[in-house]
Amino acid sequence: MADHLREYVRSGWLNPATVSDKIFEVAALHGLVGEPGSDQEAAIMQIAMSANLPVELRSTGRHDGKSDDAGMPTTPSLETKTPAVWKGTEPLKQRWLAAARIPCGDLTLYSGNGGAGKTETAVQLLVSVTAGLGDWLGCVVETGPALFLSCEEPEANIRDRIERICKHRCIDPHAIGDLHLHFPDLEATWLVTADRFGKVMKTALLQQIELWISVRRPILIVIDSIAAVFDGEAIARRQVRSFLAMLRKVARDNEAAIVLLDHPSVRGMADGSGTANSVDWRNSVRAMLHLSDADKNDPDIRELEVKKSNYGRSGEKIKLRWNGLTFVTKTSADSSPYRAAAERDVDELFLKLLDKRIAQGRPVRPSTGRGSAPFELAGDPEANGVSSDAFRAAMERLFTAGKIVSVETGPASKRRKHIERAPR
């Protein structure tokens, strides 16, 4: 009879824990549970598991796809790996959408008070990525298509932002074909909703977005904001983690960076953490940015800070200034366009000289010292005075961007590594 409860559990009408408790209660009333650890107790546990197991596991029974002697399904075996499977393979390099700030294939939380400039700077990021500008507030960014889900600001406001930003960068906003904007009805912005048992379920909007992403393959998705798309209890750990796990799967499956805009709570503003509601919002993302309020002495000044970075170093602080059109980095010497453009030039020179060395049959190594790529390329007549330190920084950026790879050659007794362009 317990098996009749499966569909009710699957549809969310019954809580799995409640079902298990009731099965044991009925078994105890009939004296069927037995002593702790007994075969009778194990049999009742199997019945409870049978009623609660997901559909894809119920049909398999034992880990070999069968049932045990009593006809009851058993738990599938746990699949594991050992470090031995990594032998002879290169570890995956972390890719960055925005160098050392926003990782690809994962979630980034971007918090700040209303009116601080989160949406403005997020739109700057979208324009830079889709227009191929290559920089965002002092760091290098990748280029590709992007999706902006605007659940708080109307189309007219976003258009004004895009046109001002493009005017500042001297580009035509109407020529940006890879920037895709969606403005859902303000009464239908939820991506997930929670039922009365707390189970988080996808809405039709999220399913539409997932399908669009799988077809268009954007490298950046910006969602404005969490409060507008999460129809659950923001302090409920299970609901928060379920929601973010859904988005992380989208990011990883499509190798895209997802940036979630958020407003900090009163406590988050007071302690400087920049978080809102449950700490699971911060704990469940791999990176977090925070934009400060306007400076008390100068309303045009803000500070962008990397609050968390699981793949790099946190603590970077960037002073921003409003220039009448949009935000720019405060120090002109390291301002966004100039610094990023200089780094791109060195990256391109690195690749050019690398191709030259490969063509000459003189490969360079990813190590340090003589024979390494930075040392050898700096001594090339076409290096134009670029130092080995600058080439070393370029090498790290190119490895991170997946544009170069380390290749191992030679006999088993004397393996050697050298650098090549990544296959396209």
Image (spheres, grey):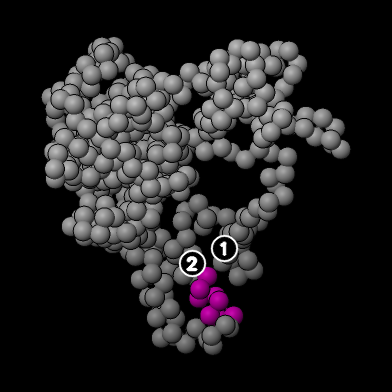
**In front: 158, or 70?**
158
The correct choice, above or below, for 336 with respect to 103 in the image is above
Magenta highlight: main SS: helix
Q: Secondary structure at mark 2?
A: helix
- Does residue 226 appear in the picture of this structure? no
The correct choice, above or below, for 171 with respect to 254 in the image is above
Q: Residue at x 27, y 13 (%)?
A: 171
**Residue type, mark 2 in image:** Met
Say which quarter of the image contains residue 118: top left
**Residue type, mark 1 in image:** Thr
**In front: 350, or 246?**
350
Image quarter where the N terminus lies is bottom left
**In front: 88, or 200?**
88
Q: Residue at x 23, y 19 (%)?
A: 168
Image quarter where the C terminus lies is top right
Mark 1 and mark 2 residues within 8 Å of each other at the beta carbon: yes
On the image, numbered disc 2 is attached to which residue? 49
The picture places residue 69, in percent across and down from the top left corner, at 64, 68
Q: Which residues are magenta?
A: 39-46
On the image, numbered disc 1 is attached to which residue? 75
Q: How packed is label 1: few (under 14 Cα within 10 Å), some, or many (20 or more)? A: some
Tally of numbered discs: 2
Q: Secondary structure at mark 1?
A: loop
Q: CA distance from mark 1 to mark 2?
A: 8 Å
